[in-house]
Amino acid sequence: MESQEPKVTGSPLMYSNRVTLKTMLESSDGEMVLVGETVVVGGWVKSSKEVKKHPVTLPPCASDTDHASPGRQGLTCLEILESRIPCFRTIIRILCGPASSPAVREKLESLVPKPTPPSTFFLQINDGSCASCLQVVIDSTIAPVSAGQILPTGTCILAQGVLEKLSANEKQIIQLKAEKILHVGTVEQDKYPLSRKRLPLDSLREYPQIRPRTTMVSSITRIRSTLDFATHTFFQKYGFLHVQVPIITATDTEGFSEKFQVTTLLGKTSKEEEPVGVSDADVVSLETVKAAIKEKSGVVEQLKRSDSNRESLIVAVQDLQKTNEFARQIEAREKSKPVTAVKPNSLNFNDDFFGSPSYLTVSGRFHLESYACAIGNVYSFGPRFQADKTVSSKHVAEMWTVEVEMAFSQLGVRLCIFKAHDAMKCAEDYFKFLCKWILDNCPEDMKFVSKRIDKTITHRLEYMTTSSYDKISYREAVEILRKGYIPPMIGQVPDKAFETQLQWGVPLTAEHLSYLADDHYKRPVIIYDYPKAVKPFYVRLNEDGKTVAAFELVVPKKDHNREPKSYVQIGTVITGSQNEESFNVLNTRITEFDLSRDQYEWYLDLRRHGTVKHSGFSLRFDLMVLLTTGLIDVRDVIPFPRSHGKAKS
């Protein structure tokens, strides 16, 4: 009768028969439903131990038990072979004398290979679907594997077995009793970075390809993915259309940004330029020198074989050595030769790939405006780039941004017929939606980050979800800051002094924003009507001619009970504005900022042809992840961070 494979049950993945650990460990009753069922699980070993079994004397065969006397029980393997195979007994006597000799018997026993003692392996594995681990128990007599294969941290296994319920006093509720090992991915233990003790996050950045296997980074990644999904859920729910804006653009959206230029002209200079002071190593190619080396090596070999004039041989060898040295100089020069720095005035951009200067985009709001002025409310979600060398815990060269643009919409500060659809209200609702969504949909990961990073993070997110946000103008913010930090009487010492002198018209610094959100209001605050000099040229000019219709959503920093060095002043998470709809005003602003008019002709077309009032905002997505996880450096919440001097992976 043919043996049947056990039926694999459980709740497997859509395109795999594997059951995720999240299904078994984080569902309310999933682990109880699957107990006793055969499932397939896979993951990477987090920790392990081996328990060796004590050797047990094998019982005699059934036939021996039925017919042998009690005195034959406990016979050695050699005695069994002698009794059952007469020819083997004869061979032993011929080669070694009487087999009953203790010396011969000991010698023969040593020749018989001893089986490896059986072991039981206890593995804690994680498959990245949740923060919890599952214990997998492997009996080497049932599923043959070696300790060197299965025990090292980072080993990947795929196992089939039965889920067992553990006693109430155990740390875990269930474990998998393996019946079959389907795959083992071994690890070079001496090179695997996670085989050591827990590495700090800044050390993990050196191994971006491996760090997702840590519980910390995998939890952050799941939180990031949940916020990503929440973003699309919110805007799709309220009728926004998702528009993909270009990454390569010829327009500087901000007007004064540090941009990455995209070009195929690196190393190419104009034809008029001639090389100056060129050495022999620059003129002679490496291929020519190698050909000369081959020819001269042949001459040397020929002189050696012909046994001719010794002086000629010495001269030929010296010539060959000089040529080899010359070749090494050329190779070293080519390896160390930097990319030719090309001045813009020496380039002809008509020969470039795009035919004009092009850059990685800093913002996609200009392109979103084109679609908002045609199909209504739109949003985009993608990477934005700034060639800023500043070392900061809140900035890297490539950061993801959510950008929103709404037609027939104003900023929302003053009463108007569009108030229900204004940008400021939408930004506040979106931010609260993200906070609530992460609490509702990532409870286990939030428990983990609360335990390991910031125990107050859940409470603060709940507070930001339910509290009302104060809305103040820039002018009001300056008055509050002056009252809070400037002594009212001569001789009175303030609690704290700003590093930057506060006066109307200057940008609010991180310490200014921190005071407003943390000390004065103790909750998120929205600041609007900024001076026109501190905001981009396209923001709508207010009636006073001094301020523009722009706003910022500022959030509090971390718990005050934490060490000051652990504070992260996230500050502004969302920036928004009502964009200038007047052609004449926008044209004047471009001139004021001394910008290239040709670069913005297509943007001015939106004012020439069927202009409409419109507004929008941008959320710095990476800072939102930083806020919800409680971490202090944005490089730890980005899968592959790109910063100045760091882009190896």
Image (tube, rainbow, N blue to C red):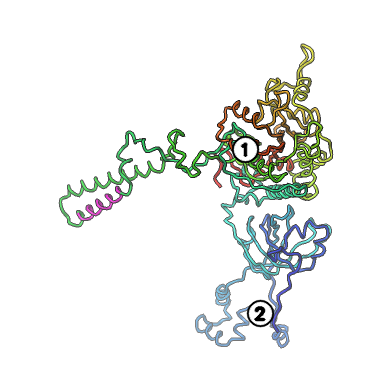
For label 1, the SS is helix
Magenta highlight range? 288-302
- Residue 251 on the magenta segment: no
**Residue, x 55% and y 82% (percent of image)?**
98
The residue pinned by badge 1 equals 605
Q: Where is residue 555 in the image (x, y as percent from the top left)?
A: 75, 35
Residues under labels 2 and 1: Cα distance?
100 Å
- Closer mark to the observer between disc 2 and disc 1: 1
Q: Does residue 482 sit above or below 369 in this rendering?
A: above
Is 295 inside the magenta-drawn segment? Answer: yes
Image coordinates for residue 228, horizontal then vertical, percent: 71, 48
Mark 2 lies on a secondary structure that is loop
Residue linked to disc 2: 75
- Asked if residue 234 is positioned above or below residue 516 in the image, the reply reads below
Q: Is residue 153 left or right of residue 317?
A: right
Which residue sits at x=80%, y=57%?
Answer: 27
| In the image: residue 356, left or right of residue 155 | left
Residue 162, can we see it?
A: yes
Up-down: is 131 above or below 84? above
- Residue 317: give its label: none
